[in-house]
Image (tube, rainbow, N blue to C red):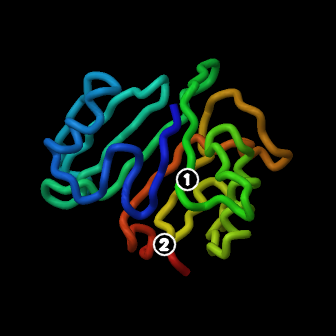
Amino acid sequence: MDLHLAPPHGAGPVHLGMTLDEAVAAVSPWGEPRVRTRPNRVLATVSVICDHMGVEVLLEEEDTVTAVELWWPGEGRESSTRVLLEGVGVLGVPAPDLFRTPADDVLGHLAAQGWRVHDADGEAPFVAGLSLGFTRRTSQEVPRRRDGLPVHFTSVLVGGEDYYDHRLP
């Protein structure tokens, strides 16, 4: 299966702006979603496992989906699902699979398309205008670069158009 990310609009069947009920219905074909409500900044989350990958739908504004985060399967687990970015192929080269392509290559791919990648610490790069955020943080045993950062991303988040504006320098 291919799971297409369409920043800043959504990921797969989940679209930003959906209600909680719509988000639950969208991810239900993947498994039994778990809905949690919280008193903090994230008002609710909908979590499900899709082919060993974690999917978390965030509702940070009342009853509205504001972001979708996908997590790689984890140490020792494989997924046949590819996570691809819609519309970011370069000169006929298809978009990279975000969890199988080295993180530096993914970021280079985005930069080659003219996107400004903000990568101050290397662990949590983001592309503000595209509203994509990545994580390399993990305590698991994974291949690492010489500086200790994991070679591959461990999560990717698709947010709304201004989702990462607060992190801009």
Q: Which residue appears at 78% of the width and 39% of the height?
A: 144
Compared to 132, does 167 lie above or below? below
In the displayed orientation, state which residue is furthest to the bottom: 169
Residue placed most toward the observer, 52 or 11: 11
- The amino acid beneath tag 2 is Arg
Percent x, y for residue 146? 85, 46
The label nearer to you, 2 versus 1, is 1
Percent x, y for residue 149? 73, 46
Residue placed most toward the observer, 146 or 33: 33
Percent x, y for residue 129? 50, 74
Q: Which residue appears at 20% of the width and 36% of the height?
A: 25
Determine the CA span between mark 2 and mark 1: 22 Å
- Residue 85, which numbered label? 1
Q: Which residue is mark 2?
A: 167
Q: Between disc 2 and disc 1, whose residue precedes?
A: 1
Q: Tell me where residue 34 sits by quadrant.
A: top left
